[in-house]
Amino acid sequence: MNDLFGPNRAGKSAAPSAVKPAPRDPAAPKSAARAEPDSYSAKDIEVLEGLEPVRRRPGMYVGGTDEAALHHLAAELLDNAMDEAVAGHASFIEMTLETGNFLTVRDNGRGIPVDPHPKFKHLSALEVVFTTLHSGGKFGGKAYATSGGLHGVGSSVVNALSERMEVEVARDRILWKQAYARGKPLGKLVNAGPVQNRRGTAIRCKPDPEIFGALAFSPTRLYRLCRSKAYLFRGVEIRWACDPALLKSTPDIPAEAVLHFPGGLRDSLEEDIADAARVLPAPWSGEAALPGEATGRLEWAAAWLESADGFLHSYCNTVPTPDGGTHEAGFRAALLKGLRAWGEHRGNRRASALTAEDVLGPLAAKLSLFLREPQFQGQTKEKLTSPDAARLVETALRDRFDHFLAGDPAQADNLLAFAIERAEERLRRKESKDTARKSPTRRLRLPGKLTDCTRENAAETEIFLVEGDSAGGSAKQARNRDTQAVLPLRGKILNVASASADKLRANQELKDLIEALGCGVGERFDRARLRYGRVIIMTDADVDGAHIASLLMTFFYRELPELVRYGHIYLAQPPLYRLTQGGTSIYAMDDADRVRKEKQHFKSGTKIEVSRFKGLGEMPPSQLKETTMDPTRRTLLRVVAPPEDRAATNALVESLMGKRPELRFQFIQERAGSVAEVDV
């Protein structure tokens, strides 16, 4: 044991001490290590029964206790109803949102069984479903060929996290009722008498404030959830209803609607890309059964966009998979291999150089897979991991994509030419970079304070322009090293609208900025050499920061107008305040936003800890990343100068930044009355 756990871990035994330890004084206190035997015993082993694990650790089942987790409850109820529709037993689903945060989901399916359960004879099957984890009709595959619920976890989890749940089941012309509170039945299943012209299950629930606090269902999120489900299964009709009192802040959401889309995913895609220019006039869409002995089917819709960024929204058994997975891998493989094969068939040798970026980058697509016993990553099922899904999807799609291309050779050639143009443009960008990042640093001639990113594709990168080394240090720690570069600038840069050409050429800060961008300026400007897709001005959320941002915008507008014209310039939006109460933290952009959010998110009269960020340099890197630099959570403002307003824009820049201070004074006088004071 000494060799493993003793102070000498090199494999040699420790030499005995040459000094004998002194005898211990009986009056001296015992050491902490030897005072008491270990008190850890069987009584410390806690066993959570029933639905108590869900209430104790809700994050394990619905991902947390935030707004997304709250709406996960609604998604689970809707998924179970959708399973009945997909299985062919229900033709409509109703979702109703009432005041008091009550949500009802009803279907006209078979209804949950109410007879005694063979294993728990003292309980009905319905009560077992709602009070026992991992119980349901989706394990054996006899009741449902494919399903999107949590396979025996969803209904019981919703029950456990609801302050109250009421269940009604109409089977064999008899209505059954049972109510629950925080997962526990308030009584036995009750026969409520005969009913006519009704069948199926209705569940009415209210999320528990002990779990979710003051969070409430959002009519906007629920309505969009219903629309997406109706698109995913063209045979179902979803009836949406919401108390009009809940729609005062969301007038675009109807109080009632019937959602039914015979075109399925094609209708959904057409709605999403209605105004986008397309390579092909119509989307490629269809349905197919999975090959071999696999149980399930596939539906898809895809369109290639001329200039807009593409997307791929995927689903499995009507459940969104935002993190993709194996079904997306099969979809991409089928399209890339299919277009390469078409190029070879047409004798175009350049088709072999096509990459996934060339073919799939501008692709806007939706993919829906119905699969028996799918495997997901995590309880909330955001990524499909079923190993066979990639092969099944690729096999099902490849043959149909080949037929699609062969059915209209002219359109297929057009798509191939578009992809090859993208490939050649990608290669030109790579070859034309005179400041390629793989070259030795001494040949790059990049400014010394620039902390560059590693990715070579300029379209996927961005540079943050920050004030000073302190803010630069925080930004460097918060950035994504792969795609985000940081250039600290010293103080307020030169006002190019009022400075002479000699001063402009002699200004080191502007020279560093131009060298970092790599595209040159004036007659030497070449947009193809721009080293970053986004140039982000990130300054403090105060008056000085706004002044620096104005100077930088003036520089780009006057000296590099092409970057503004093509939408490369952005303004970051760092917060000025952090509001904390208990475990809740909210960020506010300015004084007005602070007052608004204090009233919106916190109870009046309660103590709120307010932290004011003195500057980006004093903001912890983790918070800077969370609020300002993480592309998934930040807000960016794009700097634009519409061509039709060129004269007005020139006049405004001259008034605010030009050499004549009287114009600025006049501008301020004319607008002083429109500046509102914030009562803090």
Image (spheres, rainbow, N blue to C red):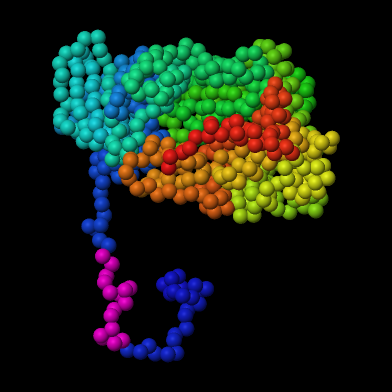
Find residue 225 and report its horizontal and vertical position in percent: 42, 24
* Viewer-closest of 386 and 381: 381
Left of 164 or right of it: where is 679?
A: right
Residue ID at (23%, 17%): 170
**Placement of the N terminus among the 4 image quadrants:** bottom left
Q: Is residue 670 visible?
A: yes
Left of 41 or right of it: where is 307?
A: right
Residue 35 shown in magenta = yes
Residue ID at (74%, 21%): 417
* Numbered label tally: 0
What is the magenta range?
Answer: 24-39
* Viewer-closest of 437 and 555: 555
Q: Is residue 339 visible?
A: no
**Placement of the C terminus among the 4 image quadrants:** top left
* Viewer-closest of 36 and 529: 529
Q: Is residue 165 above or below residue 21?
A: above
Residue ID at (77%, 27%): 350
Q: Quadrant of residue 249?
A: top left
Find residue 182 and report its horizontal and vertical position in percent: 24, 36
Find residue 500 and report its horizontal and vertical position in percent: 80, 42
